[in-house]
Amino acid sequence: MAFDKLDKSALPQHIAIIMDGNGRWAKKRGLPRTAGHYKGADNVRNIAHYCYDTGIKVLTLYAFSTENWKRPKAEVDALFKLFKEKLQDYRALMGNRDCVVRFIGDKAPISEDIRESMLSIEEYSSQFAHTGYTFNFAINYGSRDEIVKSVKEIATLCREGKLNIEDIDEKTVSDHLYTCGLPDPDLMIRPSGEQRISNFLLWQSAYTEFYYSDVLWPDFTPKMLEKAIIEYQKRNRRFGGV
Ligand code: FPP
């Protein structure tokens, strides 16, 4: 049955969003690209709060990829300055919504002060596991890098005699990804008119429904997200069956 209104009984459990279009948003207004990133960061809270209040249990937002280091140093520095400001503490990031926060990606190359903020938010938010909500921020995240990490960890377990090669299955690989223990994304959204996955959740998105929008991320409103969810609810997911 198709719904033109949100069906609260059939919500996606996990929504993943590629927050794209900040640069173009700024350019259209004659502003520096950084202004677009700041506007995009403001939108994180609108969307996160909408998801929380609607009952979306897992949200994963792509903020910085392992390939984004290729950008001009000034832009990378500005982005990390922005992350530093937004990741001051749990409440500065999430407001009054209680959920587990995870920073998925390789933290090692990130400066110590930001790394410490991330760890402290993760630690503080672990008390909210009972809520069933987990919001992931992908920072220095690359899906291929994540899969390599998983393979290395599994190989190490085999070498140490803690795991038999014959016992490796899909769950073993999933269990060594940053998203371990979370459901795969049901819906992946990319605003800004681009239609590609850009090294985001490659393993996890095997049966994810994709939704593209021409609207740039800073202008992507909760109402537009709701429209995407309604469209998702009209799709017939078969997971390879009939
Ligand atoms: C891609 O758009 C966007 C980014 C690389 C940065 C996204 C980061 C944020 C929205 C801030 C996140 C904040 C927190 C708190 C984690 P683009 O600049 O490549 O856009 P363009 O394609 O128009 O140039």
Image (spheres, rainbow, N blue to C red):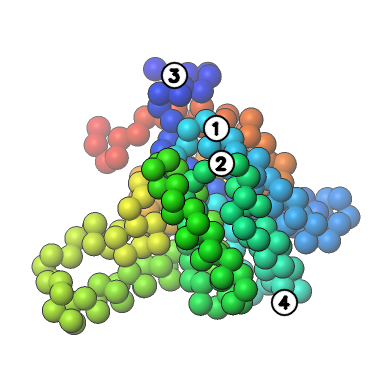
Mark 2 and mark 4: span between their CA atoms? 34 Å
Left or right of 24? Residue 205 is left
Instruction: Determine whether the residue tagged by mark 1 lies in a helix, strand or loop.
Output: helix
Q: Residue at x 72, y 67 (%)?
A: 81
Q: Kindly check if marks 1 and 3 are in contact, taking CB atoms under 8 A apart as contact.
A: no
Q: Nearer the viewer, mark 1 or mark 2?
A: 2
Q: Kindly check if marks 2 and 3 are in contact, taking CB atoms under 8 A apart as contact.
A: no
Tell me the kind of residue under disc 1: Asp
Mark 4 and mark 3: span between their CA atoms? 48 Å
Q: Which of marks 1 and 3 is in front?
A: 1
Q: Nearer the viewer, mark 2 or mark 4?
A: 2
Mark 1 and mark 2: span between their CA atoms? 9 Å
Tell me the kind of residue under disc 2: Arg
Between 140 and 227, the one nearer to me in the picture: 140
Q: Residue 24 carries which label?
A: none
Q: Earlier in the sequence, mark 4 or mark 3?
A: 3
Q: Residue at x 41, y 67 (%)?
A: 146
- In the displayed structure, 109 sits above or below 50; it is below
Q: Kindly check if marks 1 and 2 are in contact, taking CB atoms under 8 A apart as contact.
A: yes
Q: Residue 97 carries which label?
A: 2
Q: Residue 2 carries which label?
A: 3
